[in-house]
Image: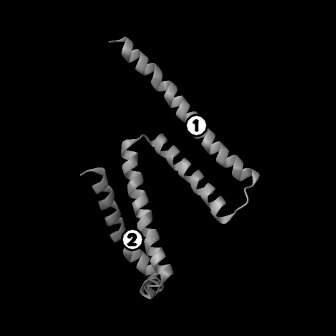
């Protein structure tokens, strides 16, 4: 079983395990909302599908890259989301917002440079040994 199938099965079994719990706690309110079928309900379901797809793609990316690189990708994504929200909604940027975004980008840059420096000596050593 490959990682994509494993992720699918784990989520399916988790969903089946949690449905009774959700129905117990949310029960009639959830069913009433889902039966309504208005725009908010469709957005709620669409959000759930996109959340699953995001997790599935993150799982597949994590299979190809190491965990730190994946964390940096997520960090960059968060900074991009915050930047988009600032522009789209016209949210004023406080000093701490700007410092946090700058620190995140600077940290990713430093990691990229450190990784490049650690790979370079291995490549030159490998060439010299031939």
Q: Which residue is mark 1?
A: 109
| Residue 123: quarter of image | top left
Colour basis: one colour
Q: For this rendering, which residue is in front, 25 or 8?
A: 8
Placement of 22 over or under 105, stated as above or below = below
Placement of 69 over or under 35, stated as above or below = above
Q: Which residue is mark 2?
A: 18
For residue 78, side relative to residue 95 (left or right): left
Which type of secondary structure does the marked residue at label 1 adopt? helix
Q: Position of residue 116 (x, y in %)?
A: 50, 28
For the image, the number of numbered tags is 2
Q: Position of residue 34 (x, y in %)?
A: 43, 83
* Residue for point 43% across, 65% down: 50
**Quarter in which the C terminus is drawn:** top left
Q: Position of residue 88 (x, y in %)?
A: 63, 63
> Gap between marks 1 and 2, in whole Å?
41 Å
């Amino acid at each position: 079983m490959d990682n994509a199938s494993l992720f699918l099965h784990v989520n399916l079994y988790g969903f089946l395990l949690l449905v009774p719990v959700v129905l117990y706690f949310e029960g009639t309110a959830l069913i009433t909302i889902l039966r309504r079928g208005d725009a908010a309900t469709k957005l709620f379901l669409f959000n759930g599908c996109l959340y699953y797809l995001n997790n599935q793609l993150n799982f597949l990316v994590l299979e190809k890259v190491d965990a730190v690189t994946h964390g940096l990708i997520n960090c960059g994504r968060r900074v991009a989301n915050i930047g988009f929200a600032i522009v789209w909604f016209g949210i004023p940027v406080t000093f701490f917002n700007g410092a946090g975004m700058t620190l995140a980008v600077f940290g990713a840059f430093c990691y990229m440079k450190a990784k490049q420096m650690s790979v370079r000596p291995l490549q030159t050593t490998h060439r010299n040994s031939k």
